[in-house]
Image (cartoon, helix red, strand yellow):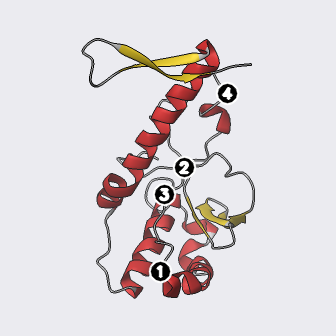
């Protein structure tokens, strides 16, 4: 997801794992909100969709603590009612201004409001939740690709200046 322009488009999974070009962080990603049953609600030019499959290689950003039983009990109802609103009809979609990121952030802000908490703007949500998770995923993907390519991955050890240590090794 490119937070600067707010544009989002579906991402091919090969961008992350299989392709030599790899995901470089400059392409727009697609976002959705998961129900407690694992359905991913997402919004695009065709409206709101509920998907059981196709999100297997997504980056998960937890928003609700497991001990928030009251909210978890209402989550699916909130999500269903929110998604049925006219604001999410297909003709209202705009690639830059009213897209999947808008959908996800507006839902999150509705939940925050119901919990009597302050809403977040796009930049705040991106900085606090999206960037830390995508950085972690990027590091993992880099290590994964290097191990697949070389059978190992080396990294500078923090306690040794200029030294390296093996952090991963692939055996057959």
Disc 4 to disc 2, how far (Cα)?
A: 16 Å
Separation of residues labelled 1 and 4 (CA atoms): 38 Å
The secondary element bearing badge 1 is classed as loop
Q: Which residue is mark 1?
A: 68
Report how far apart the C-alphas of labels 3 and 2 lie in the structure: 6 Å
Q: Residue placed at 65% from the left, 39% from the top? A: 12
Q: Tell me the CA gap for discs 3 and 4.
A: 23 Å
Q: Quadrant of residue 111?
A: bottom left
The residue identified by callout 4 is 18
- How many residues crowd around disc 4 within 10 Å: few (fewer than 14), some, or many (20 or more)? few
N-terminal-most mark, 1 or 3? 3
Image x and y of residue 31, in percent: 54, 56
How far, Cα to Cα, is label 1 from label 3? 16 Å
Q: Earlier in the sequence, mark 4 or mark 2?
A: 4
**Which residue is labeled 2 in the image?**
59
Q: Is residue 14 left or right of residue 118?
A: right
Mark 3 vs 2: CB contact within 8 A: yes
Which residue carries the number 3 mark? 61
Residue 86 visible in this rendered orientation of the protein: yes
Residue contact between numbered discs 1 and 4, judged by CB atoms under 8 Å: no
């Amino acid at each position: 997801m490119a937070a600067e322009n707010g544009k989002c488009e579906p991402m091919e999974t090969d961008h992350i794992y299989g392709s030599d070009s790899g995901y470089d962080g400059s392409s727009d990603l697609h976002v959705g909100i998961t129900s407690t049953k694992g359905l991913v609600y997402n919004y695009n030019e065709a409206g709101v969709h509920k998907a059981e499959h196709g999100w297997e290689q997504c980056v998960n950003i937890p928003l609700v603590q497991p001990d928030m039983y009251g909210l978890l009990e209402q989550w699916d109802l909130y999500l269903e009612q929110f998604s049925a609103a006219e604001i999410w009809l297909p003709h209202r979609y705009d690639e830059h201004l009213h897209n999947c990121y808008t959908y996800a952030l507006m839902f999150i802000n509705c939940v925050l409001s119901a919990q009597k908490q302050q809403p977040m703007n796009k930049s705040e949500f991106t900085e606090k939740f999206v960037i830390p998770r995508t950085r972690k995923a990027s590091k993992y993907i880099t290590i994964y690709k290097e191990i697949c390519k070389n059978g190992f991955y080396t990294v500078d050890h923090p306690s040794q200046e200029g030294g390296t240590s093996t952090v991963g090794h692939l055996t057959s």
